[in-house]
Amino acid sequence: KLCGKMRRFNIRVVVGDKVTVGVSPYDPSHGLIMYRHK
């Protein structure tokens, strides 16, 4: 799942992209894609 900023600016993530994932402390099984590395 993408974070709000990535959804707002319509940033696409494809298979093979390096990303940073933020994990919720309350539910470690769910994470958000926070950043797509260039």
Image (cartoon, helix red, strand yellow):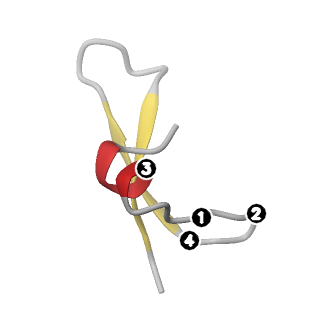
Give, as a three-letter code, the residue at label 4.
Lys
Q: Which mark is residue 15?
A: 2
Question: In the depicted view, which residue is nearer to us: 18 or 7?
Answer: 7
Give, as a three-letter code, the residue at label 1.
Arg
Q: Which mark is residue 33?
A: none
Question: In the depicted view, which residue is nearer to us: 37 or 29?
Answer: 37
Q: Position of residue 36 (x, y in %)?
A: 46, 69
For residue 25, side relative to residue 19 (left or right):
left
* Mark closer to the chain start, 2 or 3: 3
Task: Report how far apart the C-alphas of labels 2 and 3 lie in the structure.
Answer: 17 Å
Q: Which mark is residue 7?
A: 3
Q: Residues within 10 Å of mark 1 (few under 14, many from 20)?
A: few
Secondary structure beneath dot 4 equals: loop
Task: Report how far apart the C-alphas of labels 4 and 1 lie in the structure.
Answer: 12 Å
Secondary structure beneath dot 2 equals: loop
Marks 4 and 1: CB-CB under 8 Å? no
* Mark closer to the chain start, 4 or 3: 3
Task: Report how far apart the C-alphas of labels 1 and 3 lie in the structure.
Answer: 9 Å
For residue 22, side relative to residue 12 (left or right):
left
As displayed, is residue 38 above or below residue 28?
Answer: below
Secondary structure beneath dot 1 equals: loop
Q: Position of residue 16 (x, y in %)?
A: 73, 70
Q: Report the residue at 30% width, 54% height from top.
A: 5
* Mark closer to the chain start, 4 or 1: 1
Marks 1 and 2: CB-CB under 8 Å? no
Q: Residues within 10 Å of mark 3 (few under 14, many from 20)?
A: few
Between circles 4 and 3, the one closer to the viewer is 3
Q: Report the residue at 25% width, 13% height from top.
A: 26
Q: Which mark is residue 12?
A: 1
Residue lying furthest bottom: 38
As displayed, is residue 14 above or below residue 1?
Answer: below
